[in-house]
Image (cartoon, helix red, strand yellow):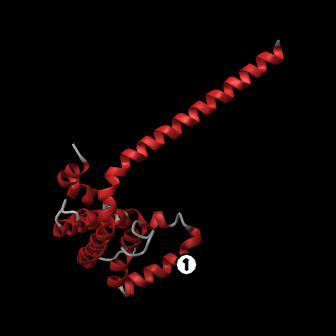
Amino acid sequence: MDINNLISHYGYAALVIGSLAEGETITLLGGVAAHQGLLKFPLVVAAVALGGMIGDQLLYLVGRRFGNGLLKCFPRHQKQIARARSMINHRPWLFVIGTRFMYGFRIIGPILIGASRLPPRIFLPLNILGAIVWATLFSALGYLGGEVIAPWLHKFDQHIKHLVWLLLVIALVWLVRIWLKRRSARESKDNNAG
């Protein structure tokens, strides 16, 4: 089965799973696949939004249950945690939606929100809205990036065979070189012993 067939058959499931946590890369690739016609753009956005929303919802629930204990494990960061909690309480919409766009904050953000005891009736709609905005933006960036990547992808398939042969030749030369060095060292050792 070729790669295009795999993407067409399992692409949406891969997007949901890949976007459960830090999913920017997979979301961009989903957009590229939509540009290539392998996936449908609205379904890419829906799959990515679903995965992102489920992932953040699960992390939020972990934060509600275990968050305070987890956050105590970071004594040096208590000042930043207190500041984030204050922002969550005063501007939950900004923090819940903005967490998706803060690099490295996608996992700790929902845990922190859950630990801050933001009510689920507030978190859930903001989580859904944030997931849709995030999925649309990054899928669109991938789709637009497909314009740039498309010519390269068509040539890549042709060049991959050349790359494999080149790597095989390099490996062969390297192995022959090692063999010759060992042989030379063995002959030198035999000459010195004799």
Instruction: List the residue tagged with mark 1.
Output: 79
The spot of residue 90 in percent (x, y) is 38, 87
Q: Residue at x 36, y 45 (%)?
A: 161
Quadrant in which residue 155 is drawn: bottom left
Q: Residue at x 56, y 36 (%)?
A: 173
Neighbours of disc 1 within 10 Å: few (<14), some (14-19), many (20+)? few
Compared across the picture, whether 66 is left or right of 146 comes to: right
Q: In terms of depth relative to the viewer, which is nearer, 108 or 90? A: 108
For the N terminus, which image quadrant? top left
Can residue 160 be seen by looking at this rendering?
yes
For the C terminus, which image quadrant? top right
The spot of residue 100 in percent (x, y) is 36, 73
Task: Report the amino acid beneath label 1.
Answer: Lys
Can residue 62 be seen by looking at this rendering?
no
- For the image, the number of numbered tags is 1
The spot of residue 75 in percent (x, y) is 57, 68
Q: Residue furthest bottom?
A: 90
The spot of residue 145 in percent (x, y) is 32, 70
Q: Residue at x 55, y 78 (%)?
A: 79
